[in-house]
Amino acid sequence: MTINKAYTSLRVLAPKITSIDMDTVIKYIQNHDFYTTEEKRMAYIIFRNESLNGHKGINNNYIGFQCDGGVWPSQYTKYFIGYCIEKENLTGKQRGFLCLSKWQDSVDIILDEVESRKMYIGGAITSPYVGFSIVTRDNICRAYEDLWVYGDKNYIPTKIEIKDFDSMYEQATLLFK
């Protein structure tokens, strides 16, 4: 497997675990007036889930952004300072992870991704990776798992995944109103 087939001009960096406290992340998300409340809630959940509550970023990448697949939208390349090779949490396989300048880059990217993919309650998804079109409270966990984690419209979240997601969503409703 080619670790970095999408961004061959980026330099290889040593993987470095980075962390940020969630209170700081929450305040940063709350200050993004351009995004809706539901978009902010989903960005918060993805950031928490992908980074183990801000404790496990890889070179300021807290959202699992990888470079061994396709190319991301061009507006994100300004954030990329390199890539590193690290084991993926889900599979344990070595993967190429994009390295970012600062933790805020992860939030800016995930807010934009949530908005553009319509991956929030009320969003109208048009992706072939999801087996439904309108995101509701009942299927938002599946939207996340299908669009961000697995890329498989046939994946059914486990009861534990749904329970954990629902808990984070309830917390998000208190933080983002």
Image (cartoon, helix red, strand yellow):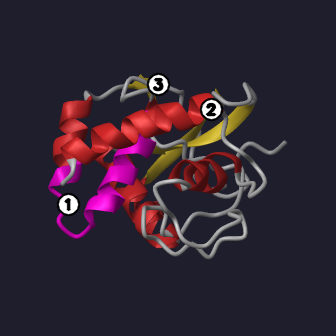
**Secondary-structure class at tag 1:** loop
Nearer to us in this view, 90 or 87 = 90
Lower sequence index among marks 2 and 3: 3
Number of the label disc, if any, that sits on residue 16: 3
What residue type is disc 1 on?
His
Lateral position of residue 108 relative to residue 87, left or right: left
Q: Residue at x 68, y 58 (%)?
A: 6
Residue 38 magenta-highlighted: yes
| Mark 3 surroundings within 10 Å by alpha-carbon count, few (fewer than 14), some (14 through 19), many (20 or more) | some
Q: Residue at x 54, y 42 (%)?
A: 64
| Mark 1 surroundings within 10 Å by alpha-carbon count, few (fewer than 14), some (14 through 19), many (20 or more) | some
Q: Position of residue 91 (x, y in %)?
A: 74, 30
Q: Residue at x 69, y 36 (%)?
A: 95
Residue under label 1: 32
Gap between marks 1 and 3 measured at Cα: 28 Å
Nearer to us in this view, 104 or 28 = 28
Lower sequence index among marks 2 and 1: 1
Residues drawn in magenta: 29-48
Residue under label 2: 159
What residue type is disc 2 on?
Lys
Where 74 sits versus 147, above or below? below
Gap between marks 2 and 1 measured at Cα: 32 Å
Image quadrant for the C terminus?
A: bottom left
Q: Position of residue 58 (x, y in %)?
A: 48, 31
What residue type is disc 3 on?
Lys
Image quadrant for the N terminus?
A: top right
Mark yes or no: residue 50 visible.
no
Q: Residue at x 21, y 42 (%)?
A: 174
Gap between marks 2 and 3 measured at Cα: 33 Å
Do residues under tags 2 and 3 come within 8 Å of each other at their CB atoms? no
Tally of numbered discs = 3
